[in-house]
Amino acid sequence: MVLCLSACSQDQATGKNSAKSWVSDKLIIWNHITYIATNEKVEKVGEKIGMIQHYSTKEQESTPDHFSNYYKEGTPLYKIPNVAVEDAIAVKIKENEYIKANSQK
């Protein structure tokens, strides 16, 4: 017996269902490092290190840098005090509200 499974999810931006095979539904690629956003709140952030410049829910053969499949273009990214940028960054989700994104080294 052969069992084949497929998954669909709803796109946050369009509300449409789409098949996805991303490693995570909250993927960020910044300075050639892949991060996965968590639900962990960050209370204090350091300097702004950049922003999301490319957004898409369509998986691509090559993914551009400064990219997310969840956060829209213009979403600010910040350094977390006393944490190496290679380990984690903060993502601004609302005014004065940030979550942690861990690198996938």
Image (spheres, rainbow, N blue to C red):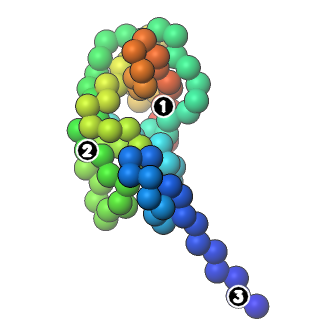
In the image, what residue type sits under mark 2?
His
Query: Disc 2 vs disc 3: Cβ atoms closer than 8 Å?
Result: no
> Residue 29: x, y in percent?
35, 42
Badge 2 density bin: few <14, some 14–19, many ≥20, Cα 10 Å: some
Q: Which mark sits nearer the N-terminus, 2 or 3?
A: 3
Q: Is residue 89 above or below residue 3?
A: above
Secondary structure of the residue carrying tag 3 is loop
Q: Which mark sits nearer the N-terminus, 3 or 1?
A: 3
Secondary structure of the residue carrying tag 1 is strand
In the image, what residue type sits under mark 1?
Ala
Q: Which mark sits nearer the N-terminus, 1 or 2?
A: 2
- Viewer can see residue 90: no
Query: Disc 3 vs disc 1: Cβ atoms closer than 8 Å?
Result: no
In the image, what residue type sits under mark 3?
Val
> Residue 100: x, y in percent?
50, 26
Q: Nearer the viewer, mark 1 or mark 2?
A: 2
Front in this rendered view, residue 2 or 105? 2
Which residue corresponds to mark 2? 54
Which residue corresponds to mark 3? 2
**Which residue is situated farthest in the right direction here?**
1
Residue that appears at 37% across and 10% down = 46
Q: Is residue 90 above or below residue 31?
A: above
Which residue corresponds to mark 1? 101
Tell me the distance, in whole angstroms, between the alpha carbons under discs 3 and 1. 37 Å
Please tell me the numbered disc located at residue 8: none
Residue that appears at 35% across and 60% down = 58
> Residue 9: x, y in percent?
53, 58
